[in-house]
Image: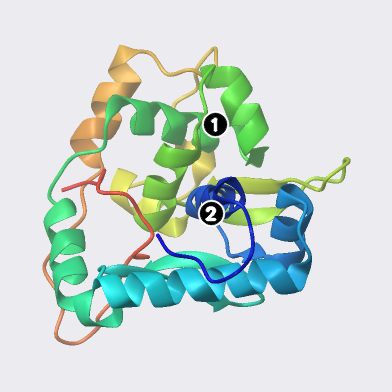
Amino acid sequence: MIMTVDVSVEAVRAIEAIVLVGQDPVPTSLLAELVELPATTVDAVCEQLARTYEEAGHGFTIAKVAGGWRFQTHADMAPYVERFILDGQRARLSGAALETLAIIAYKQPISRLQIASIRGVDPDAVMRTLHGRGYIAPIGRDDGPGQAVLWGTTDLFLEKLGIADIAALPPIASFVPDASIVEALEKTLRIDTTISDTAPEEAPSSNAEPEAVE
């Protein structure tokens, strides 16, 4: 990678790494603080990275969106990405995703940190999958320090389980589901990939990971 901006290779790699793991566009000001560089320099580095990716013919780029930087697929790769998303919808949710979904369903509203404390692992990847498939969504913010985003289940989740509201879920003694609940969720959570001619639904987010449901 050839950089015309006078910064260290480590700083450039750090910027790439931070933007890659960011769920939302990462503000220039935050990047500047983390890598200890002026904001103008950070923007210049990201712009140079975008040119480098373009010249190398990569299928992705780094772009400034909504005041922050994020990685995104190149526009001409859209047909392949769409095909990948549709193919992914035929796969079932993993055990980790089902467990996380059950925790959210029974504990909502709940933050990522609370989910992590219950499961004992970082839930970000499976939560992106669940969010992309339309089963969970942000429903508010915590009143405590940091005002963490609180998550809950959606109407699509209720629809797939065939229940009217969360109160209709069977009671459980703890928030970590046992084998019978996981099995029930696995059998009932499916996505109908048939597209209606009269009432098309909004497609899932392209940010979702390839861990999906049928």
Decide which of 165, 39 is in the foreground and name it: 39
Disc number at residue 194?
A: none
Q: Residue at x 48, y 17 (%)?
A: 176
Q: Position of residue 84 (x, y in %)?
A: 16, 60
178 with respect to 89 (left or right): right
Can residue 175 be seen? no
Q: What is the three-letter code of the residue carrying label 1?
A: Tyr
Element type at mark 2: loop
Judge whether 203 appears above or below 116 on screen. Answer: below
Q: Quadrant of residue 94?
A: top left
Decide which of 56, 96 is in the foreground and name it: 56
Q: Residue at x 40, y 59 (%)?
A: 1
Q: Earlier in the sequence, mark 1 or mark 2?
A: 2
Residue under label 1: 106
Judge whether 74 appears above or below 193 on screen. Answer: below
Q: Position of residue 162 (x, y in %)?
A: 31, 47
Q: Position of residue 40 (x, y in %)?
A: 73, 74
Disc number at residue 23?
A: 2
